[in-house]
Amino acid sequence: MGHPRYTEDFKIDAVKQITERGYSVGDVSQRLGVSTHSLYAWVKRHSTPLDSAAKR
């Protein structure tokens, strides 16, 4: 059956729930049915590092 595929928009919204709205990874994981491992990977990939944001 394999792993479900999520759209980039879905991933970005999930990351925003954690980084902008202040929800915990565990809460978002349970609500969306996504593993915490996936969420941490998405946060790492889709979050803007502070150093690069300061250079803009």
Image: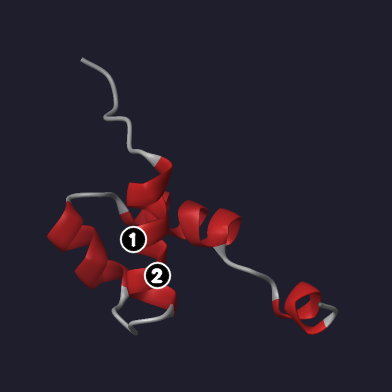
Q: Which residue: 57% across, 66% down? A: 47
The x, y position of residue 19, in whole percent, is 44, 77
Proximity of marks 1 and 2: CB atoms separated by less than 8 Å: yes
Does dot 1 land on a helix, a strand or a loop?
helix
Quadrant the C terminus occupies: bottom right
Horizontally, residue 42 falls left or right of residue 25, namely right
Displayed quadrant of residue 24: bottom left
The x, y position of residue 41, in whole percent, is 50, 52
Residue that label 2 marks: 16
Displayed quadrant of residue 15: bottom left
> What distance separates the C-alpha of mark 1 from that of mark 2?
5 Å
Q: Amino acid at mark 1?
A: Ala
Q: Nearer the viewer, residue 6 or 28?
A: 6
Residue that label 1 marks: 14
Residue 30, placed above or below residue 17: above
The x, y position of residue 40, in whole percent, is 46, 59
Q: How is the image coloured?
A: secondary structure
Density class for disc 2 (Cα within 10 Å; few <14, some 14-19, many ≥20) is some
The x, y position of residue 2, in whole percent, is 27, 19
Does dot 2 land on a helix, a strand or a loop?
helix
The residue furthest top is 1
The residue furthest front is 56
Residue 50, placed above or below residue 17: below
Residue 11, placed above or below residue 16: above
Q: Amino acid at mark 2?
A: Lys
Q: Which residue: 36% across, 39% down? A: 7
Displayed quadrant of residue 36: bottom left
Q: Which residue: 29% across, 27% down? A: 3
Horizontally, residue 8 falls left or right of residue 5, namely right
